[in-house]
Amino acid sequence: MPKSPHLLVSLALLAAPWAVQAADTAPKASSHVEQLLNRLDQVKRIGAVAVSPDGTRLAWVREGKQPAIELADADGHGAHALDVGAKLADCDKRDIAWSPDSRRLAFIANCGKDLTNTEAMHNDVYLADATGTAAPHELAKLAGYARALAWTADGKQLGFLYVPGATRHASATAAGKPQVGVIGEDAHEEIQRVASLDAASGALRTLTPATLYAYEFEFAPDGTRLAYTAAPPPGDNNWWVAKLYVQDAKEDAAPRAIVDPSTVADPLHGLQMALPRWSPDGARIAFIGGLMSDQGATGGDLYSVPSNGGAPSNLTPGITVTPQWFAWTGDNALLVSQNAKGQAQLATYELHGDRATAQAPYFSLPAMIGAGGAVLSVSLSADHRRVAYMQSSYEHAPEVHAGPLGHTPPPAVTTLNAALKPAWGKAVSVEWKNEGRDVQGWLLYPADYDPHKSYPMIVQVHGGPAWGVMPNWPGMAAMYAASGYFQFMPNPRGSFGQGEAFVQANRKDFGYGDLRDILAGIDAVEKMVPVDDRRLGLTGWSYGGFMSMFAPTQTQRFRAVVAGAGISDWQSYYGENQIDQWMIPYFGASLYDDPAAYAKSSAINFVKQAKTPTLIVVGDRDEECPAPQSFEYWHALKTLGVPTRLVVYPDEGHHFADPKHVRDLLQRSLDWFAKYLPASK
């Protein structure tokens, strides 16, 4: 049940409301709420970050109302916006990629406005002279959606993922098409394929077959072959059953599946694969394999397979961290970026046969890092001596960090958000034990914390469940701590950060062991700080939304709930969502083979025990957690006399897109907790 990639209220996800009430009855923001949200929404966002292959230059994307690509020396000096001309000034720019010779920078520009479901998207690919002596050159106009630009090693081709004629973003979290007319027989299936552009002429080639939906790819070091993960369409659903393919990097080449997780031995059996990467000698392909509840939320063990086919090997069985990104730094060495109990950690793994041994980490950071694309990714120079990425934490808003790769974390080389100060209190990592497991989470203190006072606390459960809360500048997602609440964000069993066994510990057990971990975490927090156990709130999105619906049927400990994009009935959900493939690894069988496994964790089966006032919010075109799940829960609570309200947001998917909806949702959430769980008595 895919989740929001950051915190529950990782407000890029939340919020676009069409209410079950008329629009003119939406709440009017108080001056206090408006001032709070304005203060929390001041951050300047950074997109992709890239160090040039020769290690001398940096580039990054500055997002927002005036999007720009900025260039600088390797130490950040001489930063300036790339002159893209008036035509591209207001266009979104993304997917920056340095040419192997470090002289050119490729990027994708999207100058379109909001589209209807019948209008095709248009993405244009540009090449810029990195010296800035000439305006960017339009290499190709693409009628469709393009992403993940990558050069071949010889600098002659640009590969990318391409959906010709796309009418929506290629993601299950995007708003789905209206389910009207004849269902399931759409003759025009939008297929994502690996394509390439000739860097000199702009000639387009489509490399992978139209019978496969490609998710991730990489060219072999010599550029003659291609490795990619793919599955038959529909692409939104079948990522969970994708195979690893290799083929020649040319049109009409025959793909060969070299890893099919459904046929290999445990522990990979039936699990997911991500980030296929060629070894420098082209002999092997490494990837991350594990139980992943969302495409893009990568985490698991490191695997390797011969590039000509063979049995895959688990290189890291039994490790107690979660690798989320990696790169080859030699024929027998990997640089791995991993989640270690909620902290970002960079470490080298040395390969010895079919095992990899982790060396002492370069560093661990109570922060989130990323270079764009994969979670926890970093950008490396060709000699692997310099590194660059965006970094943010609970204490510091996002900045570009860059420098030599070593045991000292690279410094910030920008000051885009230096003036911002947290509007919430301090953040601490909390660790506790439950049922023989080590569990961890993050606690935000309320603004202006007074140790002599007693405070309410809101527990915020992340999405996934295969995900994990890591320190990140929360902005509006910290609105509870900024409003006088403790804000507790646990990483219960099922989360990343403590190895694959911990991730898989909640299979066939949703709402039970994970809830016990959370309740034990609340007990641990209450021993640390003055939290009033009679004033606890609960909130979450996606898997966190499910927990926000299920927990009140199992415990009366919470006094108010805000449930976002939740799941109330796993049995009806199985037939309603557009991504049912993710469920079988978690529940062990389909609904039709083992309905009891689904009934066990369905809140609707225990709903008569729910007494907690609950605000329910969802997008009306959510493919991952469809709106009928929220209607079911709302209808039950309303019938049983439990205070409740349902707000449905129009034209929104699992990740909300309209900023007005985000603010509406935030205000409603604050108002709900203020009514039933006031921050002050």
Image (tube, rainbow, N blue to C red):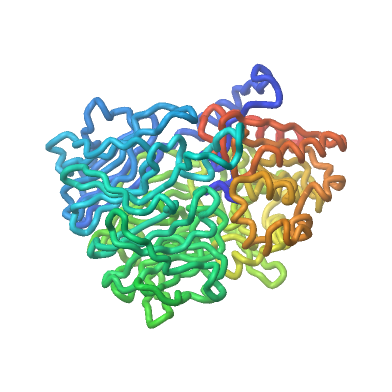
* Residue drawn at 68 percent across, 19 percent down: 22
> Disc count in the image?
0
- Answer with left or right where residue 291 lies relative to residue 432: left
> Residue farthest to the left?
133
- Residue 329 lies, in percent from the top left, at 30, 69
Apparent side of residue 111 relative to residue 85 in the rendered image (left or right): right
Outermost bottom residue = 353
The percent coordinates of residue 656 (x first, y second) are 54, 36
Residue 339 image offset from top left, x and y in percent? 49, 62
Q: Is residue 639 visible?
A: yes
Q: Residue at x 44, y 27 (%)?
A: 114
Quarter the C terminus occupies: top right
185 and 15: which one is in front? 185
Instruction: Name the residue rendered at 62%, 43% in the picture.
Output: 446
Which residue, as the protein is rendered here, is positioned at the far top?
A: 24
Residue 477 appears anywhere in the view: no
Front in this rendered view, residue 399 or 282: 282
Left or right for 152, reference 542: left
Q: On screen, 314 above or below 591?
A: below
**Which residue: 30% across, 60% down?**
219
Q: Is residue 102 above or below residue 222?
A: above
Most foreground residue, 180 or 583? 180
Q: Is residue 472 above or below residue 645?
A: below
Residue 567 location, x and y as percent? 70, 46
